[in-house]
Image: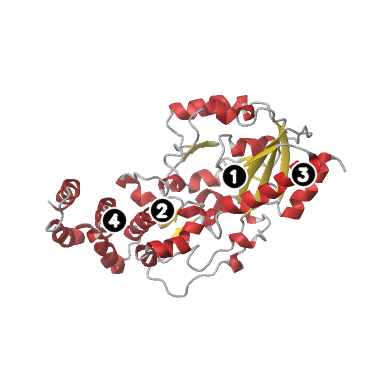
């Protein structure tokens, strides 16, 4: 058995669904795209700011010869998604944050595969799961994991786009796989379904407008509140409508099966969540990295978008929260939900408010 076949066989034993190989030549074809996106302010800001490090694998591992790209499906079957019977108000969390944090799950798998390469094949390795400077999707595309869809996601022929990506850099020379041609054709369902029009044209994502980004950013302008709908972390809109996901294989990775509180959380529960409960629940998912306050802010926004006036009292209670940015969010959410009916509630808060910025916001809405 040659080196490549040995790695593929071991990857299947470990529970890696997809694997591909590519060389360590710089991704020059991606450089101009990144430069252009930076000029247009389309980058999220979560990326490494050094474009040279993003396109050149040797700036990460000087003696690398091969990049091993892997994919693990998170296309969880619907019968594995428990749903509460009674909700005060239900929110939505992206599938990417169902179950255990994928960084931890894939890191365990990549660590096992790396140890196999080091101990059995005498190769050096470095592995990453959404944490390195290199462009995961570009690596996956060149390694034949899948093609880049019009929604900028990697789409695999068997598993669709609900796949987590990771990579191993090694000093072993392994024959590369071929890239895969796009199968999107004339389909533009993903572009039409984006609630924030973040897919400004095929294969072009304005990350600053993407709902997934908006639910994670710290300073969220209130003009984006309505576009977020009832999402409190991430967004699956463009993937949900993709025809390739309709027939994609389902995931058998139990680590990504959500608990009852996870996939469709009760937003009032999220607002009442203390630090201990956050640590025991959402902090163990990929959606917890921004902290409890971010999820609570998003929950308030989602409640404000609900058109369910019966939950106004829960938003009103957050007007008295100690955190200034939570009070600010609650003001806009309450006004979004009730319009002028919120004015008496806002006036009551005005009697106790001491922050000049909050006072100014309330005065603009009330008077």
* Distance of label 3 from label 1 (alpha carbons): 21 Å
Residue placed furthest toward the bottom: 85
- Disc number lying in front (4 or 3): 3
**SS at circle 2:** loop
The residue lying toward the viewer, choosing from 256 and 116, is 116
* Left or right: 258, with 18 as reference point: left
* Percent x, y of residue 258: 55, 64
**SS at circle 3:** helix
Earlier in the chain: of badge 1 and badge 4, it is: 1
* Distance of label 2 from label 4 (alpha carbons): 20 Å
Q: Tell me: residue 336, above or below residue 85.
A: above
**Do tag 3 and tag 1 residues touch (Cβ < 8 Å)?**
no
Earlier in the chain: of badge 2 and badge 3, it is: 3
Residue that label 3 marks: 119
* Distance of label 1 from label 2 (alpha carbons): 20 Å
Crowding at mark 1 (Cα within 10 Å: few <14, some 14-19, many 20+): some
* Left or right: 331, with 306 as reference point: left
**SS at circle 4:** helix
Residue found 69% across the figure and 30% down from its top? 64
Residue that label 1 marks: 129
* Percent x, y of residue 230: 41, 58
Residue that label 4 marks: 333
Residue found 33% across the figure and 58% down from its top? 300
**Do tag 1 and tag 4 residues touch (Cβ < 8 Å)?**
no
């Amino acid at each position: 058995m040659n080196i490549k076949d040995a790695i593929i066989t071991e990857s299947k034993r470990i529970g890696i669904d997809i694997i591909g190989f590519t060389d360590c030549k710089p991704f020059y074809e991606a450089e101009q795209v990144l430069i252009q996106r930076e000029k247009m302010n389309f980058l999220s800001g979560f990326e490494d700011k050094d474009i040279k490090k993003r396109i050149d694998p040797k700036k990460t591992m000087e003696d690398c010869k091969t990049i091993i790209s892997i994919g693990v499906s998170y296309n969880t079957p619907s019968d594995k998604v428990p749903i509460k019977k009674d909700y005060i108000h239900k929110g939505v969390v992206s599938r990417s944050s169902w179950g255990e944090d994928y960084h931890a799950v894939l890191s365990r798998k990549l660590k096992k595969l790396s140890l196999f390469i080091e101990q059995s094949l005498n190769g050096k390795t470095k592995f990453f799961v959404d944490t390195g400077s290199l462009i995961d999707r570009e690596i996956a595309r060149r390694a034949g994991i899948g093609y880049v869809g019009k929604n900028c996601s990697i789409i695999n022929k068997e598993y669709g786009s609900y796949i987590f990506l990771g990579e191993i850099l090694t000093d072993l020379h392994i024959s590369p796989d071929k890239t895969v041609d796009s199968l999107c054709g004339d389909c533009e369902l993903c572009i039409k379904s984006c609630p924030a029009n973040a897919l400004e044209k095929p294969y072009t994502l304005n990350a600053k407008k993407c709902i997934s980004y908006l639910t994670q950013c710290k300073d969220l302008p209130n003009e984006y509140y309505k576009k977020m709908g009832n999402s409190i972390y991430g967004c699956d809109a463009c993937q949900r409508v993709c025809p390739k996901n309709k027939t994609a294989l389902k995931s058998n990775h139990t680590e990504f099966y959500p608990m009852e509180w996870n996939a469709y959380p009760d937003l009032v529960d999220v607002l009442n969540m203390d630090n201990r409960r956050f640590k025991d629940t959402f902090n163990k998912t990929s959606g917890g990295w921004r902290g409890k306050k971010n999820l609570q802010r998003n929950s308030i926004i989602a409640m404000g978008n609900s058109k369910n006036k019966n939950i106004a009292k829960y938003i009103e209670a957050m007007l008295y929260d100690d955190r200034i940015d939570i009070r600010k969010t609650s003001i806009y959410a309450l006004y979004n939900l009730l319009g002028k009916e919120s004015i008496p509630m806002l006036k009551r808060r005005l009697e106790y408010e001491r922050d000049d910025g909050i006072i100014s916001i309330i005065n603009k809405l009330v008077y």
